[in-house]
Image: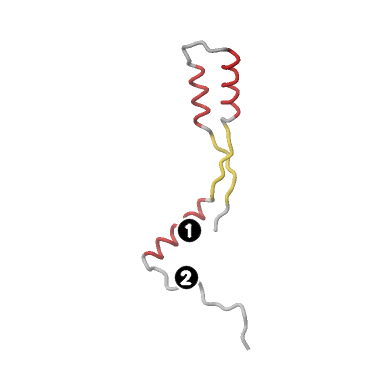
Amino acid sequence: MGRIEPRPAQNDAARELRQYLHWLDVRIDSEVFRQLVDIAKKYESVVAWVEKAVDVQIAVDMVTMATRNEYEAAYPRISIFSVN
């Protein structure tokens, strides 16, 4: 029913890691520090795959209305084939 689309997203964990490293009171090996900062930078902006919200809302409405018996028909009764 829906379409999954890539959307840019911010990785809060990567941002928090950079903040933590910036305010770290303990000295750690400079190479380890640099690698951790590089990892945090690399994953700060990521791509999240999400389903279009409209499709989800339509599905929710369909199920809700069906459970309330608010439909007269689930689909139109139109035949695409002609019978002679």
How is the structure coloured here?
Answer: secondary structure
Crowding near the residue tagged with mark 2, few <14, some 14–19, many ≥20 C-alpha atoms within 10 Å: few
Q: Residue furthest left?
A: 68
Q: Position of residue 20 (x, y in %)?
A: 48, 20
Q: In the image shown, does 26 or 23 lie closer to the viewer?
A: 26
Secondary structure at badge 2 equals loop
Asked if disc 2 and disc 1 are in contact, CB closer than 8 Å, the reply is no
Q: Which residue corresponds to mark 2?
A: 74
Q: Is residue 67 left or right of residue 24?
A: left
Compared to 51, does 19 lie above or below?
above
Q: Residue at x 62, y 83 (%)?
A: 82
Q: Position of residue 54 (x, y in %)?
A: 51, 54
Compared to 73, does 29 lie above or below?
above
Q: Which residue corresponds to mark 1?
A: 58
Quarter of the image containing the C terminus? bottom right
Q: Residue at x 56, y 30 (%)?
A: 44
Q: Which amino acid is tagged 1?
A: Ile
Q: Nearer the viewer, mark 2 or mark 1?
A: 2
Quarter of the image containing the N terminus? bottom right
Compared to 50, does 30 lie above or below?
above
Q: Position of residue 9 (x, y in %)?
A: 55, 37
Q: Is residue 33 left or right of residue 59?
A: right
Residue 78 falls in image quadrant: bottom right
Q: Position of residue 49 (x, y in %)?
A: 56, 44
Q: Residue furthest top?
A: 27
Q: Which amino acid is tagged 2?
A: Ala
Mark carried by residue 15? none
Secondary structure at badge 1 equals helix
Distance from the alpha carbon under mark 2 to that under mark 1: 14 Å
Residue 34 falls in image quadrant: top right
